[in-house]
Amino acid sequence: MVTFKKVLAQSFIWILLALIYLPILLLIVWSFNSSTVLGVWQTGNGVNGSGLTGEVYEALFRSEEIGRALGNTVIVALSSATVATLLGTMGAMGAYYCKRRTTAIIEAVNQIPVVNAEVIIAMSLTVMFVMVGNIIFHENLFSFWTLLIGHVVLSAPFVYLNVKPKLLQLDPSLYEAALDLNATPSLAVRKVIIPQILPGILSGFMLAISLSLDDFIVTAFTSGPGLLSGQGTIVTLSTYVQSKIKKGPVPAEMRALTTFIFLLVVGIAVGYTIFNNVRAKRGSSHSSKRAKALARAEGRR
């Protein structure tokens, strides 16, 4: 009975992993075929007439449309993630040192954008920008800045949720000890608090980038002219794909681009894991050396 449950549990895990990663593997395979219709493997070109070719990747680097969309996406993602990380980190630190009632109110307000439907956030921001533009500025406000605000509103609450657990693990006496040693509040925050919660800040920053990269609804509602699109409406990868779907199949070059993005994310994840493991091993080795030194000192006494 125990063996059957173990086999069933392992089978469930493998089925789940297959459902997650099999579509990505298929995407990578199809990125080496120039067929515009998925499911119809184009043969006659490429290696030994099998259809395996690098033409899709060559077309990707020649596509100005995808280049502009990718550039806009990266600029918006990095800028919004930076602002959201600053706001989310400061908000989490402020809530941590507030009274319980104030902290409870802040956390309740922070949960609203997290659990709320994204279309409601996008629509409410659109109404606000239109009203402010018509009543106060008497002009159309939609531009890169409205798009930036929309992405910050979307991702800042998630940064807060990533930083908060690290603050809860923090010893509250560290900050007070730094102040007792004549450190200014800002110096104590930079030298004591920030290094302790840095993993949460980095994970929040990466999550904010991820949310911005694949966002469509907020981008469609709040974007305006600017960035690499010039006088035209800012086009990101999500809005570019959506506009192409209206007219026909998704360009084959997008398969190559998404393959590059997937490999980049995997590389960052593996590198970050290796970095944490190396740092943990160094920390444990330093601790063991310190313990041995203390033991030798106690033995000499």
Image (cartoon, grey):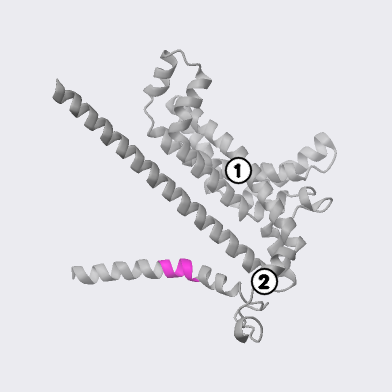
Q: Quadrant of the C terminus?
A: top left
Taking depth in this image into account, of 13 and 34 the one nearest to the observer is: 34
- Magenta region's main secondary structure? helix
Q: Considering depth in this image, is 160 or 124 the residue closer to the camera?
A: 160
Q: Residues within 10 Å of mark 1 (few under 14, many from 20)?
A: many
Up-down relation of residue 249 to residue 279 (above or below)? below
Give the labeled residue for mark 2: 56
Q: Is residue 22 left or right of residue 59?
A: left
The mark that comes first in sequence, 2 or 1, is 2
> In this image, 200 relative to 264: left or right?
left
- Left or right for 159, reference 151: left
* Mark 2: secondary structure: helix
Residue type pointed to by label 1:
Ala
Q: Which residues are magenta?
A: 17-22
Give residue 240's position: percent from left, percent from top.
Answer: 71, 61
Q: CA distance from mark 2 to mark 1?
A: 31 Å
Is 284 one of the magenta-colored residues?
Answer: no
Q: Position of residue 247 (x, y in %)?
A: 75, 71
What type is the residue that disc 2 sits on? Val
Residue at horizontal 35 percent and vertical 40 percent from the top:
282
Q: Which residue is mark 1?
A: 81
- In the rendered image, the residue lying farthest to the front is 300
**Residue 181 vertical position relative to residue 171 in the rendered view, above or below:** above
Residue 23 visible within the image? yes
